[in-house]
Image (cartoon, rainbow, N blue to C red):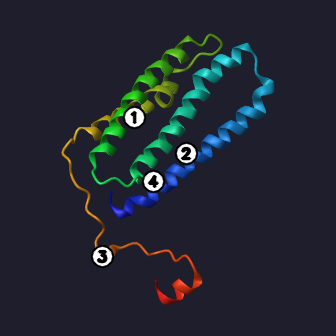
Amino acid sequence: MPDNWINWFEITGAAGAQLIGLLFVVVTLGIRLSTSQSVEAIRAFLTPTLIYFGSVLFQAMVMLTALPFAWPKGLMLALAGLAGLAYDINAIRLKRRLGFSEIKPLDWIPYGVLPMLVNASLMPAGWDWRPIKLSPPSPSRERPRFCSTPASAAHGI
């Protein structure tokens, strides 16, 4: 993975984790307002949102994992895309069964079409099965070392 993308995956992973935490806070605060009808809506709308945030966190963790070969990352992303696509089909079935609200045709784009496209785009990541050895970063683009003590920082160790 190019060094330029490390910050991107760190930020998206942290954002996914924070949004999962925020979603749990919202559900905890709104639990008193739940009725039997809202349980179906939670299952149809909040659970997929939790899965999508978790998927972002998982993708960031996969890409930030230090592996000697590139193909395990591709395989994990491809399997995640396949599982996400299967889940999206199930989530669309749940949303269509809702009896208390009607989803307008344009609302199906963010709730059904876009998640399916994103998960389908992850599947080609696993197609390249060649065992490519990842090369270490070049000395000129080496990351700065973190010093454990002030004395080692002063001596450049």
The reply to whether callout 2 and callout 3 are in contact (CB within 8 Å) is no
x and y, in percent, of residue 96 in the image: 53, 14
Label 2 and label 3: CA atoms lie apart by: 33 Å
Residue displayed at 31% across by 43% down: 72
Specify the quadrant that holds the N terminus: bottom left
Structural crowding at the residue carrying mark 2, measured as other residues with C-alpha within 10 Å and reported as few (<14), some (14–19) or many (≥20): many
In the image, 122 versus 99, the foreground residue is 122
For the point 56% across and 19% down, the residue is 103
First of labels 4, 3 by sequence position: 4
The label on residue 16 is 2
Q: Amino acid at mark 1?
A: Ala
As measured in the structure, the alpha-carbon distance from the residue carrying label 4 to the one carrying label 2 is 10 Å
**The image quarter in which residue 83 lies:** top left
Give SS at disc 1. Answer: helix
According to the image, label 3 marks what residue?
Answer: 139
- Sequence-wise first label, 4 or 1: 4
Q: Amino acid at mark 3?
A: Pro
Residue 80 is tagged as 1
Hey, what amino acid is under mark 2? Answer: Gly
Disc 4 designates what residue? 9
Q: Residues within 10 Å of mark 4 (few under 14, many from 20)?
A: some
**Which of the two residues, 95 or 12, is positioned nearer the viewer here?**
12
Circle 4/circle 1 CB separation < 8 Å: no
Gap between marks 3 and 1 measured at Cα: 34 Å
Q: Tell which residue pokes out farthest to the left in this image.
A: 130
Location of residue 96 with respect to 136 vertically, above or below: above
* Left or right position of 104 against 77: right
Element assignment for label 2: helix
> Identity of the amino acid at label 4?
Phe
Q: Earlier in the sequence, mark 3 or mark 1?
A: 1
